[in-house]
Amino acid sequence: MLDAAVRRRVDPLLDRVAAAVVRAGISADAVTLTGAVIGLAACVAIALRADGLALGLLALNRLADGLDGSVARRTLTTDRGGFLDIVCDFLFYGGFVFAFALGRPEAALPAAFLLVSFIGTGASFLAFAVFAAKRGITTEIRGAKSLYYLGGLTEGTETIALFVAICLVPDAFPWLAWGFGALCWLTVASRVASGWRAFGP
């Protein structure tokens, strides 16, 4: 829901950082992979209950996630890069929740619900993108992307806000997971409705 507004504010800053990254000869794929390693470290930290460290690593991971696209647009945008970016994002989102449950087994049930909810939003997002590409439907509301980004109540910005809240108030995880998971299912419903309308005969 907030991604488009956030991108308008953040993209100019990322573009300036990307200029320096390009001058240093660092590729977009290298930024993506570095971000993935940092994301893995964040998952390890949250599993070990090092919540402050996890929060810092989360911020670096998200910086890399925004920066790789800016670097790609200044150099060479490729399908491989877009593929790598979305795979790393989805693995990080699921991995962070799973890692939290590893460190706090008592939170396994709400964590499982949140993961299933993420599967719903991820599947509806990617399925819409597949058939939008098949029909030549495009959008740049959330900036120039390698695939169609269909919005919803729970997009990337909201998910990162959730993860920040988890790091800051880990004891509230069950309530956060149940509540955010419910919002995810509203997102799934809206995306299914959009697909039903967009991909009819």
Image (spheres, grey):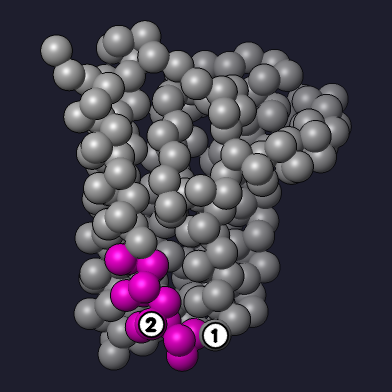
Q: Which quarter of the image is occupied by the C terminus? A: top left
Q: Is residue 200 left or right of residue 65?
A: left
Q: Badge 1, how many Cα within 10 Å: few under 14, some, many 20+?
A: few
* Rendered image quadrant of residue 7: top right
> Residues in magenta?
170-182
Circle 2: element type: helix
| Residue found 48% across the figure and 27% down from its top | 82
Work out how far the residue at label 1 is from the one at label 2, CA to CA, in angstroms: 11 Å
| Residue found 42% across the figure and 25% down from its top | 148
| Residue found 43% across the figure and 24% down from its top | 147
Circle 1: element type: loop
* Image coordinates for residue 191, horizontal then vertical, percent: 30, 40
Frontmost residue, 155 versus 50: 155
Q: Badge 2, how many Cα within 10 Å: few under 14, some, many 20+?
A: few
* Rendered image quadrant of residue 10: top right
78 vs 122: above or below: above
Q: Is residue 197 left or right of residue 161?
A: left
Badge 2 is on which residue?
175
Q: Is residue 67 left or right of residue 81?
A: right
Q: Is residue 27 visible?
A: no
* Image coordinates for residue 173, horizontal then vertical, percent: 42, 82
Q: Amino acid at mark 2?
A: Trp
| Residue found 22% across the figure and 80% down from its top | 109
* Rendered image quadrant of residue 16: top right
Frontmost residue, 189 versus 171: 189
Badge 1 is on which residue?
169
Of all residues, the one furthest to the top in this rendering is 136
Q: Is residue 172 magenta?
A: yes
